[in-house]
Amino acid sequence: MNIKEFNELKAKVAKKQSEVDQAKGAYNSGLKDLEKNFGIKTIKEAKALLKQKEKEKEKAEKAFETMAQEFKDTHGDELGI
């Protein structure tokens, strides 16, 4: 390996290190946001909260569909729907 190849390799390593540092910063920033907004300190807690929120969303969607159907059944003829 000559000096030119070494310097090229050194530049590539520095670029990759910069990308790693940037990714770590984004990760830490995301965790701080989760803790601030939801009191979550780990990815495991975030996944559990996401799962809970998805279940709540599905339940709300089903309730809405039921209520919309009831409304349509009750008032559909009057409204032409």
Image (cartoon, grey):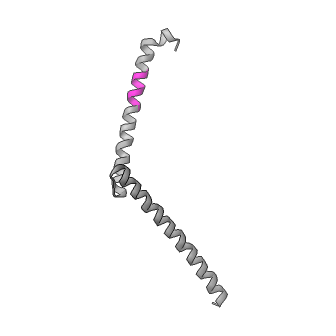
Q: Position of residue 38 (x, y in %)?
A: 35, 49
Q: Nearer the viewer, residue 72 or 13?
A: 13
- State the residue at coordinates (40%, 58%): 31
The residues colored magenta run 61-68
Q: Position of residue 65 (x, y in %)?
A: 42, 26
- State the residue at coordinates (37%, 28%): 63
In the displayed structure image, the side of residue 11 where residue 65 appears, left or right: left
- State the residue at coordinates (49%, 69%): 21
Q: Position of residue 35 (x, y in %)?
A: 36, 54
Q: Nearer the viewer, residue 34 or 53?
A: 34
Quadrant (top left/top right/bottom left/bottom right) for the N terminus: bottom right
Say which quarter of the image contains residue 72.
Answer: top left
Q: Main secondary structure of the magenta part?
A: helix
The tally of labels here is 0
- Can you name the residue that lies furthest to the top here? 78
Say which quarter of the image contains residue 73.
Answer: top left
Task: Note whether 62 is above or below 77 in the view shown.
Answer: below
Task: Please tell me whether residue 65 belongs to the stretch shown in magenta.
Answer: yes
Task: Please tell me whether residue 69 belongs to the stretch shown in magenta.
Answer: no
